[in-house]
Amino acid sequence: MMPMFRQMLDVKLLIVLLIVASLAMLTACSDADDVAERPIRVVEAQQEAEPDVVRVQLDWLPNTNHTGIYVAMAQGWYEDVGIEVEVLPYSGVAGEILIDQGAADVAFSFPTYLPLFRARGIDIVSIAAVLQTNPTQIAVLADGPIERPRDLDGQIYGGFGGPAEQPQWEWVVRADGGEGDISGVILDTAAYEALYEGRVQAVEPFVTWEGIEARQRGIELKTWKYSDFGIPDYPGVVLVAGRQAIDSDADVLTRFLAATIQGYEYAVSEPNAAAQMMIDVTGEDGFPNLELVFESARLLAAQYYVDPEGRWGSQTLPQWRGYTAWLFEHGLLIDADGDPLVDPPDYAAHFTNAIYAAARASIN
């Protein structure tokens, strides 16, 4: 296991590289049953006005995490509220950077990254939770030699190179009784094939996508949740916007989110129909495995999209405090000078329910 001082330097470097790379690329280029029965409601648009354009940055290629956006587009619900959505293709540039530079208005993001950008002074805020819980888990081959996370001592995982990635893997191995002597290689999505071929011993898939795909291929995985080993759970995917836009363009964001709420709650009540709408809008060529799309849509609808009251998009302070505090306590929140934050961040500033509440109130 690397000394803590070396680990801190590596974490700082990863964060700096993440943001520098993003800047460089930019320069270059009710209860659940009630939800199912609730009729779709539409906010009345100001028909005389030109539509307001909202540029939405995806976090990856179109997939079921984005379903609600495409449903609202297909159903004309953005048009109904005077919004024109422009979906920006994924380019590898962090959505927070694009928002900060004025190239996007709303972006899909993650609580694993948003606090890192905020620590560096980039005032980006979550306006809605796309998923209520974290769908990424530790995965190994079910028929392999790894029985428990502690068995990963001396092994290699395939990852994406996120700043919190290595500390989280080490934490889980130690929490399960191991030494935490695990190393990673950055393989991005190639990590999954590397696991199946035995070139790495563990990966971190979205169980709502890669987990389903593996099973469809006859590959059985054994998985563990991070929360089972003391790492707080968090909303798996969130929609973020800049604080300036929240303050100055609240009406536009409210209308956008009102239609988006309808899109995702339709995806809860009618997951198959919602998945088909996403396929129709984006094109079948982007989804060679259509059954994967439908099965993922059903799993998200059943377990991930809504809170215990059956509402999509809600956020709470405990959700944001838990994991962000874990990042702070482990020295992973680095300021603009490259130093770990000395004082805890304002956890409540990471999200706002103001736009969400206004959007809910505006829906007829």
Image: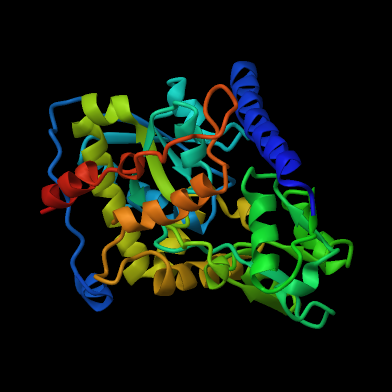
* Residue 19, quarter of picture: top right
x, y percent for residue 138? 66, 67
x, y percent for residue 207? 59, 68
Residue pictured at 57% horizontal, 48% vertical: 330
Residue pictured at 28% horizontal, 74% vertical: 32
x, y percent for residue 41? 17, 57
Quarter placement of the N terminus = bottom right
Left-right relation of 140 to 229: right
* Residue 288, quarter of picture: bottom right
Q: Relative to 195, is 77 above or below?
A: above
Quarter placement of the C terminus = bottom left
Is any atom of residue 333 visible in this view? yes
x, y percent for residue 246? 26, 31
Residue pictured at 19% horizontal, 46% vertical: 359
125 or 360, which is in the foreground?
125
Q: Relative to 189, is 125 above or below?
A: above
